[in-house]
Image: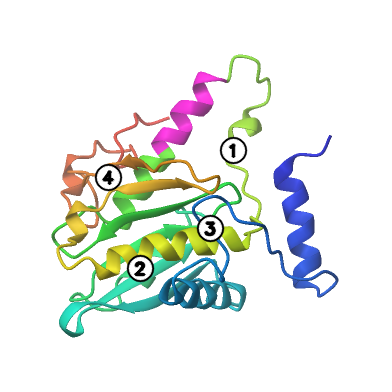
Amino acid sequence: MHRAELVHYVLLTLQRAGHIGAVNAGDGGDGGDAESLPPAVAALADRLQDVWTNRGGTNVAAIDLPRKEGETLRLVLTDDYLHTELAEHCSSSPETPALLACLGSRQVWIGPGIEADDTACVACLQDRLRLNFAARTLAHADNRSDAKDLEVERLPRLVSRSAFCRLARAAREIADDEAWQAADQPLQALPLDGGGAHDHRVNRLPQCPVRGDPTLTPPGASFIGLPPS
């Protein structure tokens, strides 16, 4: 049996080469298709799918969502929060908060909110994710004989229509909420099968080299505080 990630990668390669049509999965429960969504949400889902499909050679795409009284919210879209170019798409304007979003084949993630001086930054999020991944990997490493098995393996995700619809619904609700603040936005996991959201709070790291005090990190260690190897 082939791994789901490998199947998705092959399908994505065929799709980009023009050998198969675009993926259009059925309703994931809360995602819905264009006919069952409010017009504003369906239009945003179309826009997200178009921007992501035509992003070119980059791993990140961004669009600006209008908010109250002429304000703007920048929605930054990726398929992996660890992509190095993520931060530069969040810093187009210090006055414009950013909302991160990540596309997946079984769920999407929205959040956290990023705003200068008020929230954790992309570096804080990425380093926490690396630390969590390392901890989970080492916890299940008893039967691993090759150190290379511990390396992160990433394959492009094949994104269904339901993923864009689910994300569009959540993003539109946030943009329309006049009381929304970037500092209050957790990282939310939104299953495509219609299950409830799972919230994860992302706090600023005090030793973050971008918005913290990097002198708190011991010499020779990464800024997440791991001891030198």
Q: Quadrant of the C terminus?
A: top left
Residue bearing the label numbered 3? 79
User: What stretch of residues is rendered in magenta?
Assistant: 131-140
Residue located 42% across and 63% down the image: 169
Q: Quadrant of residue 122?
A: bottom left
Q: Quadrant of the N terminus?
A: top right
Classed neighbour count for the residue bearing mark 2: other residues with Cα under 10 Å, few (<14), some (14–19), many (≥20): some
**Residue 110 at x, y percent in the picture:** 39, 55
How many marks on residues? 4
Residue bearing the label numbered 2? 172
Q: Amino acid at mark 4?
A: Val
SS of the residue under disc 3: loop
Horizontal side of residue 94 vs 86, given as left or right: left
Marks 2 and 1 sit apart, C-alpha to C-alpha, by: 36 Å
SS of the residue under disc 1: loop
- Tell me, yes or no, if residue 85 can be seen here: no
Horizontal side of residue 3 vs 69, given as left or right: right
Residue bearing the label numbered 4? 202
Type of secondary structure dominating the magenta stretch = helix
Residue located 85% across and 71% down the image: 19
Location of residue 184 with respect to 46 vertically, above or below? above
Residue 60 bears which disc, if any?
none
